[in-house]
Amino acid sequence: MSTYVYGIASSSHRSLPVGMEGVGEPALPVRAITEGDLTAVVSDAPEGLRPKRRDLLAHQNVLAEAGAAGPVLPMRFGSISPDDAAVAGVLAERADHFKERLEALAGKVEYNVKATHDEEAVLHRVMSENPEVRALTEANRNAGGGTYDDRLRLGEMVVAAVKSREAEDAAEIQRALEPVAAAVSAGPESTGWLANLSFLVDRETAETFIATVEEVRKGHPHLELRVHGPLPPYSFVEPAPSEPAETSR
């Protein structure tokens, strides 16, 4: 039977949730696979697993229980290995990497920050910052709306200006939050967001990070920021490109 992997911990971890209910219906018991200095928190993998709310919560609860007593490298929902032997083989093969990551992520959590523009506010800002757009808008207004070509040109100029503003704002968000985080990882691009960034934050300084997000929000009223966390540091199981060299060797 295939093996479902929740996370990886040190074999000296004080308390792993062995026997706890995991994914599946009926829920499958959580167990441990130990190889050398590492232990994988696993269960059997149910057939036809889908990201249903019950299983997503079960995955999250197992990681929360394991992480309460020591650092755990979280695997994303749906991480399945062919069998227990394959899990043990990966633990042995990547032991140095996993031990380095456990050390680097100890005491840290992840916050995901997504940003969008308030459409009306960003258009107002684009108008105020771009004299050419402002002049063409006024000329079209004075001409009763302007010609089709004039309206098309204005639309293209506004779209280009908003795109430029999106790139600038995404970079500015990262610059503002990076100093209060240990590392940053860019998430997959999406048409729904101008920024999708995950930050690795020391649990003890999380309040400072949240306060800095609020400062960014207040200083940029044309932005809408959504913050999710604290989360297990899913985005940092592999070193992020911008992570300091001493934690990505």
Image (cartoon, rainbow, N blue to C red):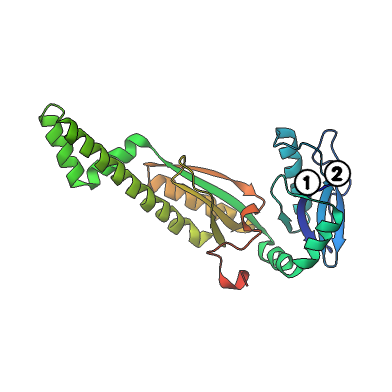
Residue lying at 78% horizontally and 48% vertically, measured from the top left: 65
Residue lying at 41% horizontally and 55% vertically, measured from the top left: 171
Q: Of helix, strand and loop, which one carries label 1?
A: helix
Q: Earlier in the sequence, mark 1 or mark 2?
A: 2
Residue lying at 36% horizontally and 41% vertically, measured from the top left: 222
The image quadrant where one finds the C terminus is bottom right
Query: Is 210 situated left or right of 104 in this image?
Result: left
> Image height check: is 220 above or below 54?
below
Location of residue 143 in the rendering, given as x and y in whole percent from the top left corner: 10, 29
Q: Is residue 14 visible?
A: no
Res. 20 mark: 2
Q: Is residue 30 visible?
A: yes
Res. 83 mark: none
Q: Amino acid at mark 2?
A: Met
Residue behind mark 1: 62
Between 157 and 6, the one lying in front of the other is 157
User: Which of the 4 quarters of the picture holds residue 54?
Assistant: top right
Between 179 and 99, the one lying in front of the other is 99
Between 172 and 236, the one lying in front of the other is 236
Location of residue 123 in the rendering, given as x and y in whole percent from the top left corner: 30, 38
Cα–Cα span, label 1 and label 2: 7 Å
Seen as rendered, the residue at the extreme top is 144
Q: Amino acid at mark 1?
A: Val
